[in-house]
Image (spheres, rainbow, N blue to C red):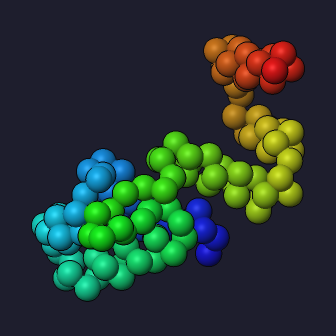
Amino acid sequence: MGPYKLGEMEQRFAEMIWEKEPVSSRTLTELCEKEFDWKRTTTYTMLKRLCERKIFQNNNGTVTALMSKDEFGAAQGEQFLTDAFDGSLPQFLAAFTRRKKLSRKEIDEIQRLIDGYREG
């Protein structure tokens, strides 16, 4: 499993941290006990796993994000493109638009993004 691919519980746990950060590890264990019915050790195991992936850090009992939720989402998208389309955004868009017709609004938004990169 890549560093930016999370299982369902990892994702829910990460969402909780992003919503509450900075959060003490003690408060986090209490929240997880209430929300997920986890024991303290389960919370610390999950936290350690996400810290090893450099998504969060636990500094002296205070848990904070090393990546914002938006940064993480972008990294997930990049990883998906790499894994599924050899990193090719045009190949992804071609495959995507074969199955789903883009609205005029979506086309305009994509065009604005492209124009912004041409000018930059």
Is 107 placed left or right of 74 in the picture?
A: right
Residue 114 sits above or below residue 56 on the image: above
In the current view of this chain or complex, which residue is farthest to the bottom? 41
In the current view of this chain or complex, which residue is farthest to the front? 60
Image coordinates of residue 48 in percent, x first then y, are 41, 78
Is 76 placed left or right of 69 in the picture?
A: right
Residue occupying the point 46% across, 77% down: 49
Is 34 placed left or right of 82 in the picture?
A: left
Image coordinates of residue 62 in percent, x first then y, are 29, 63
Residue occupying the point 64% across, 70% down: 2
Residue 38 sits above or below residue 101 on the image: below
Q: Quadrant of residue 35?
A: bottom left
Image coordinates of residue 18 in percent, x first then y, are 36, 51
Can residue 107 be seen here? The reply is no
Residue 116 sits above or below residue 69 on the image: above
Judge by depth and name the residue closer to the eye, 57 or 7.
57
Tally the marks: 0
Residue occupying the point 79% across, 58% down: 82
Q: Quadrant of the N terminus?
A: bottom right
Q: Quadrant of residue 9?
A: bottom left
Image coordinates of residue 67 in percent, x first then y, are 51, 52
Residue 31 sits above or below residue 65 on the image: below
Q: Quadrant of the C terminus?
A: top right
Residue occupying the point 83% across, 53% down: 87
Can residue 14 be seen here? The reply is yes
